[in-house]
Amino acid sequence: MGLQSKNKIDASFSMSSMTDIIFLLLIFFMLTSSFITPSGLPVNLPSSEASDIVMQEVTVSVTKDLRFSVNDKVVSRDQIKSELAILLEGKKGQVVLHIDKEVPVEYLVEIGGIAAGLEANVSIATKPY
């Protein structure tokens, strides 16, 4: 008796659907990750209860040994105002201050005053508790 099925079952596995799922997961995790760009110099940020994430257009960093940088470009203290004026020219931007917690407050006030004088919104970067 020759009983054979006309419908053969294919035992191969198609990986195309698996790669689609992996690709969608990759896109999901990239979009949901935090959009924090690191500052130019290594800075030990102070802690605060409310640490909001803002889009960083211009960053000013001050390390504990008083090295200054504006958007990853190391500058002297006297060059900060001219660098900020160039970056904020003709627009009202966002300046985020990455200042080490051991730096005296006078530097924070000075740089914040320069940025506010250029009509920029000033934020201080902190890390959450």
Image: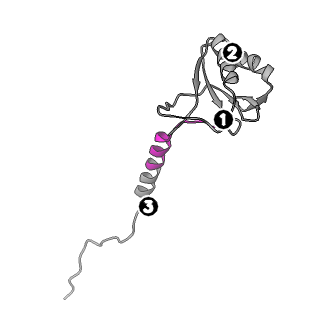
In this figure, which residue is indicated by the disc labeled 1?
Answer: 39
**Disc 3, disc 2: CB below 8 Å?**
no
Q: Amino acid at mark 2?
A: Ile
**Magenta extent:** 25-39
Residue 92: quadrant of the picture: top right
> In front: mark 3 or mark 2?
2
Give the alpha-carbon distance from disc 1 to disc 2, as whole Å.
19 Å
Give the alpha-carbon distance from disc 1 to disc 3, as whole Å.
41 Å
User: Which secondary structure lies at badge 3?
Assistant: loop
Residue 102: quadrant of the picture: top right
Image location of residue 65, percent across then percent down: 76, 35
Would you say 61 lies left or right of 12 here? right
In this figure, which residue is indicated by the disc labeled 2?
Answer: 114
In this figure, which residue is indicated by the disc labeled 3?
Answer: 15
Image location of residue 74, percent across then percent down: 78, 31
Q: Earlier in the sequence, mark 1 or mark 3?
A: 3
* Residue ID at (34%, 70%): 10
Check the image and report above or below for 113 versus 97.
above
Image location of residue 110, percent across then percent down: 69, 18
* Residue ID at (41%, 52%): 21
Q: Earlier in the sequence, mark 1 or mark 2?
A: 1
Q: Is residue 8 or residue 106 the one in the foreground?
A: 106
Please rate how many residues cluster around mark 2, counting C-alpha atoms within 10 Å: few if below 14, some from 14 to 19, many from 20.
some
Q: Amino acid at mark 3?
A: Met
Check the image and report above or below for 50 versus 26.
above
Q: Is residue 29 or residue 100 the one in the foreground?
A: 100
Give the alpha-carbon distance from disc 3 to disc 2, as whole Å.
57 Å
